[in-house]
Amino acid sequence: MKSHSFHSGRIAAAATLALMLAAVPALAQPTFGNPSPTKGSGSSNKANDMADQAAYKDVEYKNKGKRGPALVVIPGEIKSNNASFTQRFLPNNIADFGELELSNANFPVLERSNLGSLTREIELAYNLGDVNAARKTMQMGKLKTTKWVVKFDIIKAEQVAAANQGFDGRAIGGLIGVLGGSRGSAAAGIAAGSVQTQDNTGVWLIGMRYKIMDANTTQQVAQGYKELKMEVGSTQTSVLGVSGGAKGGVGLDTMVQRLVQTAVYDIDAKYK
């Protein structure tokens, strides 16, 4: 009898616990409001759609379930002569992206922020291929477990194409007004003459090289090159004094991060 009562009590306790857990709200990603006065308007929807296309997206790395060699990312080089690019970026920015994505791909990354003054010594040793300096540096503290030194270089960033097209309705509008000879044709001529459209598009090619070096010997383990196309455009329309326009495209920051993601995907797939 006692055994039956004990069993019934356990069932009741389990049921109570299940109800309590069901009452706990499920954890979800944080959401944020939009205080913009144009929220929900046509221009807002169009701008948000374009921004969604450029937003950061996680990459599902092929061998993410397999742990990679311990590594350090050192700042690479920016070899492009394009002023817009070189003024915007520093090698440290690209190395930061590299640390983030390599960590996401399940590589143990010793971040530069934890290395302090050693960072500069590591850069010099591996950029110069100084084996003795590299071995000496890699015997210090957490660096003893490091297998690879990785760098990402921008070796190309140039606008390779530009195009624009438009329509100016003034000539056609004047012609309709002259040939029509009526009030209706005059009104049509005014409407046609008010139409103004303009589209402008620029296309960039940005190329990144990655290099993997053996932490003990400074010798190159592997390298690869990835190139992506960036398009930036704008459109403008005006009819009877009512105008509309849009401007957008993937920015240089996003392009660099996507190139790093593409390079890390390569490293994860080929060299783990």
Image (tube, helix red, strand yellow):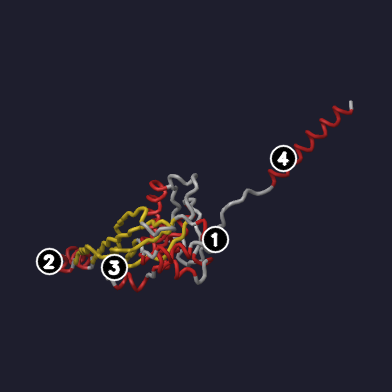
Q: Mark 3 points at which residue?
A: 80
- Depth check, front residue: 75 or 101: 75
CA gap, disc 1 and disc 4? 46 Å
Give the mark nearest the N terminus, 2 or 3.
Answer: 3
Disc marking residue 37: none
In the displayed structure, 222 sits above or below 174; it is above
Mark 1–mark 4 CB contact (< 8 Å): no
Q: Which residue is drawn at 36% across and 67% down?
A: 128
Residue 90: percent from the left, percent from the top?
Answer: 39, 70
Disc marking residue 18: 4
Say left or right for 234 vs 45: left
Dot 2, how many residues are within 10 Å of its Cα: few (below 14), some (14-19), or many (20+)?
some
Give the residue furthest to the front: 132
Q: Name the residue under label 1.
A: 142
- Depth check, front residue: 134 or 111: 134
Give the mark nearest the N terminus, 4 or 2.
Answer: 4
Name the secondary structure under disc 2.
helix
Tell me if I can see residue 66 in this picture. yes
Mark 4–mark 2 CB contact (< 8 Å): no
Name the secondary structure under disc 1.
helix
Name the secondary structure under disc 3.
loop
Tell me if I can see residue 42 in this picture. no
CA gap, disc 4 and disc 2? 79 Å
| Residue type at tag 2 | Leu
Q: Mark 2 points at which residue?
A: 175
Say left or right for 27 vs 223: right
Q: Nearer the viewer, mark 1 or mark 3?
A: 1
